[in-house]
Image: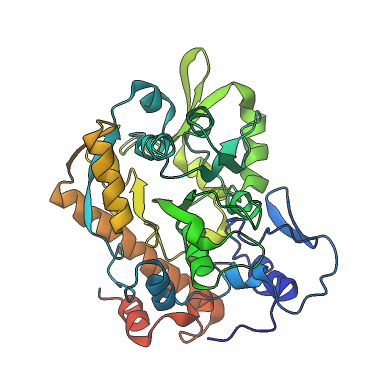
Amino acid sequence: MSQTGKGVKELIEEVIDQGLCTGCGACLTGCPYLANHDGRIVMIDKCICNEGDCYMHCPRTFLDLDRVSKAVFGNSYDDGEIGHFLEIFMARSKNSEIMGKGQDGGTVSSLLVMAIEEGLIDVVACTQMNEEKKPHGYLARSRQELLQCAGSSYEASFALEAYRSLSKDSLEKVAIVGTGCQIEAVGKMKQTPPPKSPTPQNIKLSLGLICGWSLSPRTFHPYLKEICELPNVCKFDIPHTPHYSFDLHFEDNPNIMSLPLDEIKPFINPACQFCWDMTAEFSDISVGSAGSEFPGWNTVIVRSPMGSELIVLAKQKGIIETNPLPNHRLVNLKKAALRRKKTAIQNIVEKTGNDKNLLYLCGLSESIAEKYLNPKI
């Protein structure tokens, strides 16, 4: 699929102005023409380039699932509800400090700390929150820095801007943590290496976050600032059902501010309604709370040999503990992922008015498109 002759201008027209930007940060390459301003990608000067990495690696310009899958796994795209995987189970950290700081079971933080301490990776491109709890991309190189990044803000973070900030000549072994759209961008980089960034062969590990949606920093953050003292917030959480709430935990205060989830939903990034990938299908390991049986546990989907090796090492070293994922929870997870795919395609078709124009899913095979357009499945 040829995408020559497209750059910043087309990125603005086809993605930003169309409400498709997910806030992944893949387009922020040190280019003098683009910047993240108040949670939005803006063009700060007229671009003179006819082609650009910004367009090439954006997950919402074009996404050939089969080509990306071959670049990541060496296999054709698995059109199952949760994509290609080797095993799936529940897990949680066995470290009390990480459990206290991490989200749900603290599995992601535990795996990354171990990977750095074992020398498997040198740096993690992840998300950190500033004093006002505004998320941004960050490069963590130690246990302490990783623990400062533990937890979730539920806001788009432009985390890949951190990876793209590494020197082109960097030889550091990189891990990337991100949601499905961010991991899709990484897959596109592996398919077509960006000339201004380190070779994607340096990306030794990708941990995908199972994601229902993200909140828009431009709208949600001002709302938060009106209802609480953000510097005092130590954790955001959406507890397991039936709570149906968005909870704010505070330093040195046992009281929790619990907001109805319906009050938060108006701040969801509009681009999320077009997202196809709930479970970060192109990662080495996907982790989240969806499908786990009890609070304090993560659902873990292992997708690659590298992911399997990391889990085996973590269990051998007593870093994490695991339990089988009950079958009914797996069924529920697959149903949720299926709904996401169907809803995304339905929303895309409603937007374009043409079931042959699937926007960024232009590389979707006709058979897969028909499968998810079918209202009976």
Q: Is residue 47 above or below residue 148?
A: below
Residue 48 visible in the snapshot: yes
Question: Looking at the image, is 70 positioned above or below residue 99?
Answer: below
The residue sitting at the right extreme is: 45
The spot of residue 84 in percent (x, y) is 29, 65
x and y percent of residue 310 in the render?
A: 31, 46
Please indicate whether residue 269 sits to the left or right of residue 340 in the image: right
Residue 329 falls left or right of residue 135: left
Quadrant in the picture for the C terminus: bottom left
Q: Position of residue 339 (x, y in %)?
A: 34, 63
For the view shown, which residue lies furthest in the top direction? 252
**116, 329: nearer the viewer:** 116
- In the image, is 223 to the left or to the right of 104? right
Residue drawn at x 63%, y 52% is 161
The reply, left or right, for residue 230 in relation to residue 343 is right
Residue 43 position by quadrant = bottom right
Residue at screen point 57% across, 54% down: 269
Q: Nearer the viewer, residue 11 or 334?
A: 11
Number of disc labels: 0
